[in-house]
Image: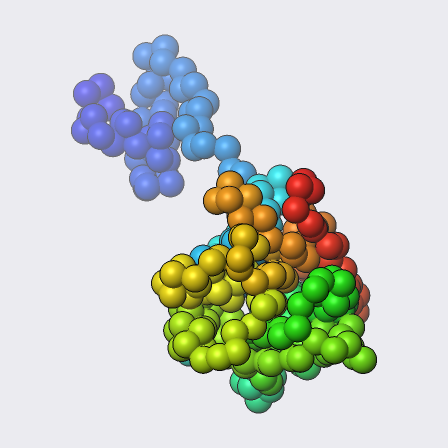
Amino acid sequence: MAAGVSPITVSRAFSSPHQLHPQTRQHVLDTASAMGYLARPRQSTALPVAPPRGVIGIINPQSDNPFFHELTCLIGQLGETRQVDVLTMDSRDSPEQERAAIDRLIACGVDGIILTFISSDTHHQAACLERLARAGIAVVLLDREVEGPHHGGIYIDNLDCGYQAGRWMRRQPVERLLILSGPSDSLVTIGRVSGIREALAGSPISLEVHYGDFSMSPTERFLSERLGQAPLPDALIGINNQITLGVLAAYRRAQLPLPEHPGGPRLFCIDGITHAELLGTAIPSIRHDLVTMATQAMDLIEDALQSGSRRGTRQVVRGHLHLSGETG
C-alpha cells in the first residue's frame, strides 16, 4: 500500500476513524488525497427508529368467557389504532394467578394496567393496588369496583341488571325460580341478586338462590344433583353466561327438556350467550355495549398516563334487555 499500512487500516481511516491513532489516520488521508482519492460521506444503513409506544397490560379473570374475551380483543384493537402495545394476562379465577399476572406485568415494565379483580379479599385487592402504585403503574378497574389507589373505572350496574331480569321473570307464568349465582361475597353477586329480589318483592314466585362459582362446570355439577330433587324449578336465572351454559349442560345430561324449549323451564341469562340462537336456543338476556366499555377503559388509561392524575372518573354502564328475535 502506498501509505505503508495494511488494507484494513485504510478501511478504518474512512469508515471508523475513531479506531485509529490520529497521526495514522491523518497519514492515510493525506496519502489518499495525494493520489486523487476523495472520501465520500458514509451513508447510514440503520433502519429508521420508530417513536416509542406505550405499553399497557390487561388482566381478566376468564379468557374463555366471551364477555371478557371480546372486551380484551376490542381493547387490543384500540391499542393498535392508538399506537399502544397491549399485553394480556388471564388470572383464571385464581387469586394466586392474579398475583402472578401482576408480577409479570410489573417485570415487563408496563405503563398501565386495565384490571378486573377476581379475588373478593379486600386485603388482597388493597395490597395489589398499593404495589402497583409504588411501581408507578396506572390502574383502571374494569367491571368490578374495589377500594384502593387507582385511576378510575368502568363498572356494570349490577343492581339494574338483576332488576331487569327480575321484572322480566315476574311477567312470566312461573311459580318456582332458582337463581344460580357466584360467590356470596362477590359485589357482582350481591348487586344482581339484590336487584332480582327487589323486582320480585310482593310476587307469589318462590325464590331459591344457590351461591356457587361464576364458571360453567361447578354450576353443572350442582344442578345435576338438584334436578334429582322435587319440586323442580320452572324458571331459572343464570347470573352470567358461564353459569347459564352450566344450566344447559345439566339439563342435557339429565335428559330433561331444555330451558326455553317446549316442556322446559323458563331461563334468563345476565350477560347473554353469544350466538345461542344458532344452536336453536333463544335465551332472554341482559347485554352490554362492549365497544363503549372498551373505549372508555382505553380513554381512562391514556388520560392517566398523560396526566399522571388519579382523578379518573367512575363510569357506570347499564345493560339492555335482549329478547328472542332481536339483533344486537
Q: 294 or 127, which is in the foreground? A: 294
Residue 59 percent location from the top left of the image = 52, 64
Question: Which quarter of the picture shows residue 202?
Answer: bottom right
Left or right? Give the position of 37 relative to 122.
left
Left or right, 253 with reference to 189: left
Location of residue 172 in the rendering, given as x and y in whole percent from the top left corner: 71, 62
Above or below for 260 versus 225: above
Relative horizontal placement of residue 65, taking residue 204 as reference (left or right): left
Q: Is residue 196 visible?
A: yes
Give the image location of residue 1, x and y in percent: 19, 20
Nearest the eye: 271 or 149: 271
| Colour scheme shown | rainbow
- Check the image and name the residue furthest to the bottom: 123
**Residue at screen point 38% across, 17% down:** 33
Q: Is residue 187 visible?
A: no
Foreground residue among 7 and 235: 235
6 relative to 288, above or below: above
